[in-house]
Image (cartoon, grey):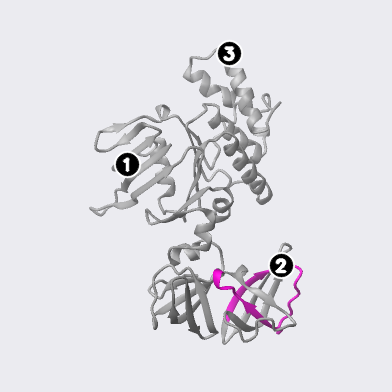
């Protein structure tokens, strides 16, 4: 449905070469797919979306929507935004404050022309029903909450029945609870409409909870593309492993034995076993083991895993109750471990515990990689 091939966009600077904001990005979205470009500010994700929308002109590459070529540097084709059949929602919503809800939705249709007043009213009614704002037609825009303004902006994007919906950080201005609610509603809506969606965000929780597939970007390139489960559980490199999730624990280790699916290692915390390595290893190789805080099984008051591989004896240094969980730091061989467990476990400062990480939860990378943070 949406195909981007070798997209290149460079911003001119005082240097002769300029700064490549997008450096050869290629993606393909299937019909009805929710696809997210995820990365920090300046990684090129918004520039990619704006190139699709026609708000930025790439330096090279091709963009197709369906079978329609909307941009090609080689063929000198660049359709204007209004001919690309896309709907857009921005971070700022861009709801016109001097209009009521009906006027916000109707104005673009009236400006485009070709529809009777009755047809415009019907389209507005249907769009508001989609975003659960029935009966809000006469509500002045300044009297809307942030969540309601976001819904109006979304309805205005959907009123054209676009082939592709483009969303640029649309939830970032909402409070935490409303953002959570809108994530659910947005996912349900796009699935119900079978709407192809390109979503841009720096928020990994949004990306993981909304997406069918995610592309992690850095410095204008895609480092890894996959389902949320693949990106989280099988990061292709240390940047992706550290960017997705928080508080990654990194452990240096040496390979003792390596098979097709399992690798045995020795570390300062004792023996470890990992499965599904991202690279091939042989005996004697240096490696890095990444363990997410929530990957640990916490053993309190018993030694269920004592002496077994993938197990660390540690002393609790900090324990913080967060309502839905318990976050802690524990000291093992002069190295702090960050962990997260369920809220029903009680940990006390100075308490000795055993932390076990099953092999399938260990992220194994080459020592040529490095974790930051």
Please state the horizontal and vertical placement of residue 303, each as a whole percent of the image: 70, 84
Please state the horizontal and vertical placement of residue 87, each as a whole percent of the image: 49, 33
Q: Which mark is residue 117?
A: 3
Q: For numbered disc 1, what is the local secondary structure?
A: loop
Q: Residue 339 lies in magenta, yes or no?
A: yes
Q: Which mark is residue 75?
A: none
Q: Earlier in the sequence, mark 2 or mark 1?
A: 1
Quadrant of the image occupied by residue 5: top left
- Of residue 64 and residue 327, the one placed in the foreground of this image is 64
Residue designated by label 2: 342
Determine whether, in the image, residue 237 is placed left or right of residue 245: left
- Of residue 279 and residue 347, the one placed in the foreground of this image is 279
Quadrant of the image occupied by residue 56: top left
Q: Earlier in the sequence, mark 3 or mark 2?
A: 3
Q: Residue 25 lies in magenta, yes or no?
A: no
In percent of the image, x 40 and y 34: which residue is there? 65
Residue designated by label 1: 58
Q: For numbered disc 2, what is the local secondary structure?
A: loop
**Separation of marks 2 and 1 at Cα, in angstroms:** 48 Å
Up/down of 10 relative to 317, above or below: above
In percent of the image, x 48 and y 37: which residue is there? 31
């Amino acid at each position: 449905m949406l195909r981007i091939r070798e997209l290149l966009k460079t911003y001119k600077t005082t240097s002769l070469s300029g700064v490549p904001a997008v450096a050869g990005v290629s993606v393909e979205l299937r019909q009805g797919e929710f696809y997210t470009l995820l990365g920090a500010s300046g990684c090129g994700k918004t520039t990619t979306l704006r190139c699709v929308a026609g708000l930025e002109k790439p330096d090279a590459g091709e963009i197709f929507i369906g079978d329609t070529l909307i941009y090609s540097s080689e063929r000198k084709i660049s359709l204007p935004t209004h001919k690309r059949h896309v709907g857009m929602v921005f971070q700022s919503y861009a709801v016109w404050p001097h209009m009521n809800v009906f006027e916000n939705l109707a104005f673009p249709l009236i400006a485009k022309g070709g529809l009777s007043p009755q047809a415009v009213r019907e389209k507005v009614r249907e769009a508001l029903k989609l975003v659960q704002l029935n009966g809000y037609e006469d509500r002045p825009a300044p009297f809307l909450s942030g969540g309601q303004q976001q819904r109006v902006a979304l309805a205005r994007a959907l009123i054209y029945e676009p082939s592709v919906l483009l969303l640029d950080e649309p939830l970032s201005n909402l409070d935490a609870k409303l953002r959570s609610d809108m994530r659910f509603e947005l996912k349900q809506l796009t699935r119900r409409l079978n709407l192809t969606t390109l979503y841009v965000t720096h928020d990994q929780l949004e990306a993981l909870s909304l997406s069918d597939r995610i592309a992690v970007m850095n410095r204008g390139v895609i480092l890894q593309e996959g389902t949320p489960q693949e990106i989280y559980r099988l990061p292709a490199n240390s940047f992706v492993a550290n960017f997705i999730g928080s508080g990654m624990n990194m452990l240096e280790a040496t390979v003792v034995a390596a098979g097709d699916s399992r690798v045995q290692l020795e570390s300062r915390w004792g023996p470890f076993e990992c499965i599904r390595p991202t690279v091939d290893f042989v005996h004697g190789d240096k490696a890095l083991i990444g363990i997410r805080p929530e990957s640990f099984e916490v053993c309190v008051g018993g030694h269920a895993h004592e002496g077994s591989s993938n197990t660390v004896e540690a002393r609790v240094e900090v324990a913080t109750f967060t309502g839905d969980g318990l976050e802690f730091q524990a000291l093992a061989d002069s190295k702090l471990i960050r962990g997260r467990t369920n809220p029903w476990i009680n940990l006390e400062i100075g308490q000795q515990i055993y932390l076990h990480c099953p092999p399938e939860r260990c992220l194994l990378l080459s020592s040529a990689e490095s974790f930051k943070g």
